[in-house]
Amino acid sequence: MADILSATDSEACCAYIASYQGRSRDLESWLTDPLYLSGLYWGMNTTFLLNKPDTLSREFILQAVDHCFDENSGGYSGCAGHDAHITHTLSAIQILKLVNALDSVDVESVMKFLKTCYKGQGLCCGDEFGEDDTRFSYCFVSCAALLGQLDNIDTDAIADHVLRCLNVFGGFGLRPGTEAHAGQTFCCVATLAICGRLGSFKHDGLVSWLLERQLDTGAVNGRPDKKEDGCYGWWVVASLSLLDKMETLRKPALKQFLLGLQDKKIGGFRPRVGSSVDVFHTHFVVAALGLLDTEGVARVDSRFCLPIHCM
């Protein structure tokens, strides 16, 4: 198997993403999915990573993001009419960063929303009613960083809390004392990187735990004794990239696993061979391929999962 994403395979992948826009009769029908805005980021970012930024209409994109803005809270919802949430707020900011439209963001309103998600002592929630979770810590600092507002949040308190979520096995969990997970670990490592605190702990145990996620086949999983899954290619590789330990990974074997996940007929990527394709896995497989220097895929900023050329 070739270790590049060919032009034909890239075109098929972008056509798969574009088909979602084509299936909708109008913008309103797109906005019935509560995960819509995050799905739009996954699809858009995939096309930008494949150097096909015009796959989705800029007008369509800006209108969709605008429809998801919640004037009452200052954040963005997954789709029009739903409550704002920090994950969708980050998706909106990432989308606008991709299309160089961050000047359209009401920064004061978004920061007001983010402050309702901050519960003190470094704890971040998805909204004012939710529980704290290190995924939301990542969303919180990412939003602030992309908007140039890091100086207006308590990065040290957030980083200190994240460090308390490092467990005895070497990975990070959603709260102190919880099980480590590759996705959660990426969120914590990236949070510490954005906050300038990667030097606040020893990396050896974490690197070992991340390397243990790679199976004999070259595939990766998210936790011990779990099945392989393509999306963990991103969570594991991005974490190692931020720790500057990419050389310890068996890159060729992982690249072959990831490239083998594309459904050549449909164009998208799947979690594992035999399963169905979806936009989420398509995005994170392509992003991981970018970190692995795959020909045909743009380089990626490991902190924000955005193409470097858009930063």
Image (cartoon, rainbow, N blue to C red):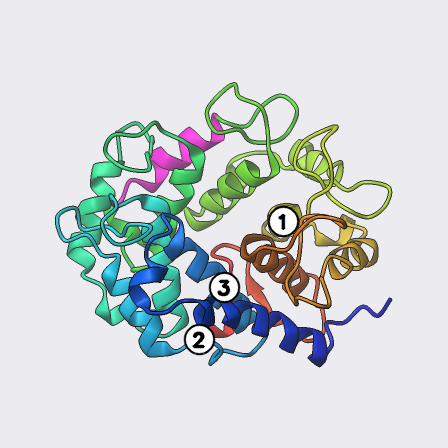
The residue pinned by badge 3 equals 43
- Tell me the quadrant of the picture where the N terminus can be found: bottom right
Q: Give the residue displayed 33% in from the left and 37% down from the top.
A: 126
Q: Measure how far apart labels 1 and 2 are at the Cα level.
A: 23 Å
Q: Which numbered mark, 1 or 3, is in the foreground of this view? A: 3
Residue 86 placed where, x, y %? Answer: 32, 45
- Count of picture labels: 3
Residue 258 vs residue 133, the one in the foreground: 258
Q: In this view, does 51 lie above or below 223?
A: below
Q: Judge the density around disc 2: few (<14), some (14-19), many (≥20) Cα neighbours within 10 Å.
A: many
Q: Give the residue displayed 29% in from the left and 60% down from the top.
A: 147
- Secondary structure at badge 2 equals loop
In the rendered image, is residue 301 in sight?
A: yes
Q: Are dots 1 and 3 in contact, CB under 8 Å?
A: no
Q: Earlier in the sequence, mark 1 or mark 3?
A: 3
Q: Give the residue displayed 34% in from the left and 73% down from the top.
A: 60
The residue pinned by badge 2 equals 56
Q: In which quarter of the image is residue 146?
A: bottom left
Q: Does the magenta stretch include residue 138?
A: no
In the rendered image, is residue 311 in sight?
A: no
Residue 95 vs residue 248, the one in the foreground: 95
The residue pinned by badge 1 equals 231
Residue 114 placed where, x, y %? Answer: 25, 44
Q: Earlier in the sequence, mark 1 or mark 2?
A: 2
Write the start and end of the magenta stretch as one range.
153-164
Q: Is residue 154 magenta?
A: yes
Q: What residue type is labelled 2?
A: Leu
Residue 79 placed where, x, y %? Answer: 30, 53
Q: What residue type is labelled 1?
A: Cys
Could you tell me what secondary structure mostly forms the magenta stretch?
helix
Q: Which numbered mark, 1 or 2, is in the foreground of this view? A: 2
Q: Is residue 125 left or right of residue 2?
A: left
